[in-house]
Amino acid sequence: MVSTSGGMGAQVLQRDKFQGAQMRGLQNHTRGLARRQRLRPAVHAKAPGIAVLEPRKFKLRPRRGKVVAAPTGKLQKLLGHHRADGVQTDIIRPGPAVTVAEKSGARVHATGLQGGTENIGGHAGGYARMPEFQAAMRSHNPPRPGNPKKFSSDAPSSGDISRVIHPTAIVSPHARIGNKVRIGPFCVIGAEVELGDECVLHSHVVIEGHSKIGKGNEFFPFAAIGGKTQDLKYIGEPTYLEIGDHNVFRENTTVHRGTHEDLPTRIGSHNLLLCYSHVAHDCQLGNHIILSNSVGLAGHIIVEDHVIVSGLAAAHQFCRLGAHSIIGGCSKVVQDVPPFMIVDGNPATTRGINLVGLQRRGFSEEDIRAIKAGYKKLFLKKDGNLANSISSLKATHDADNPHVAHLIRFIESSERGVVR
């Protein structure tokens, strides 16, 4: 009852106090409900039974296998937990617009959910029990020691996880994904991609075009694989990329498809491409190659096995990098790099044989001695005639060594000349 004593001003004062007490009681009750459900109490009067939520201001948190909403910012002008008809309201997950769950008995009727209105089985607590939604939310739970939970899974219920795909990844339904593949957050997989078994894509990886990738490859964030060639002669025909097994592509690595349909870009197996390295169109890479940070390989380059290219080095198009060679940092390579050698400089020159690398890879002392003899014949006198040097080397017993014979064939087949 409102007192009329004291005139009209007193009546207004008493009415305001009464309404303020009602509002404080409603707010206190709402805060208690929010604490029980681990929600931040940001509830205000707007319209009966309507809870308006900006999806970008809230995240999801698993709670004992059930999903609840955990607002990160203030809820925007919400009514309290009661509607005008007495039905209790509770937010369970974001939708494209308004997200409200109306709890009535043991059923939860969710409106405004993604994909339209749907009925979700639940209990009086108002938690969603959709299996795919619970699987997706496991990815938002930080992994605990001894109990890692990194991604959602579409694995069968038998417990054998065959494929793990983060819910934010975009994977074309036409892509062929192998077993035990892990695709992390915000990755994009195109329709023509074939991804082998046990590959790992950490996050923000883009694989597109006709890209055939073997098993056990690992892609780190922002690697861009299978992009369109940058060659201006490209006329739009289907082109291809082929990658072997157990390669590692570190952050911001780029690999482009070929320019013509009959010649794909190829990368072998057991290679390591470090950050910002670039493999251009039509390149042919062998096995056990290391490209250090910011290495640039122009188009049509052939890289033989066990080559190491140091940081910031760049190779001109159509060059060949011989097996077991090493290229120094910041080098400018405009001719073929002979096998087994160290080249360095701008422009690069041959500095000696890759002795440490050959020893690490199990070359015998006799093989190393023969390669060193070939180096002395061919490269010590840089102003001598290379053809005469090759003829002189062929006349010795060292030319019978298979590694020296490979060195001679490499030089004789060079079209751009070799680094001396």
Image (spheres, rainbow, N blue to C red):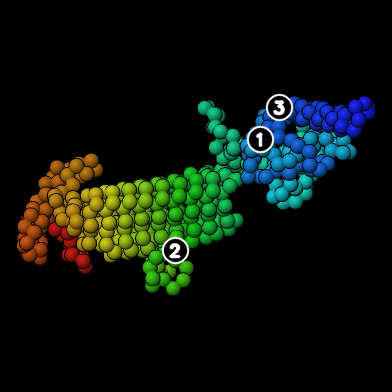
From the image, tell me which residue sits under label 1: 70
Q: Residue at the location (78% across, 28% down)?
A: 24
Looking at this view, is 134 or 390 the one in front?
A: 134
Which is closer to the viewer, label 2 or label 1? 1
Element on which disc 1 rests: strand
Q: Residue at the location (23% across, 57% down)?
A: 332
- Comes first in the chain, label 2 or label 1: 1
- Say if mark 2 contacts mark 1, CB within 8 Å: no
The amino acid on which the numbered mark 1 sits, given as a three-letter code, is Ala
Q: Is residue 152 above or below residue 313?
A: above
Instruction: Return the x and y of residue 206 as percentages of the image width and height.
Output: 49, 53
- Comes first in the chain, label 3 or label 2: 3
| Disc 1 from disc 3: Cα separation | 11 Å
Q: Residue at the location (72% across, 39% down)?
A: 92
Looking at this view, is 242 or 392 the one in front?
A: 242
Instruction: Return the x and y of residue 58 as percentages of the image width and height.
Output: 64, 40
Q: Quadrant of residue 224?
A: bottom left
| Disc 2 from disc 1: Cα separation | 42 Å
Instruction: Return the x and y of residue 90 as percentages of the image width and height.
Output: 76, 36
- Say if mark 1 contacts mark 3, CB within 8 Å: no
From the image, tell me which residue sits under label 3: 35
The amino acid on which the numbered mark 2 sits, given as a three-letter code, is Lys
From the image, tell me which residue sits under label 2: 228
- Comes first in the chain, label 1 or label 3: 3
The amino acid on which the numbered mark 3 sits, given as a three-letter code, is Arg
Q: Residue at the location (32% across, 56% down)?
A: 296
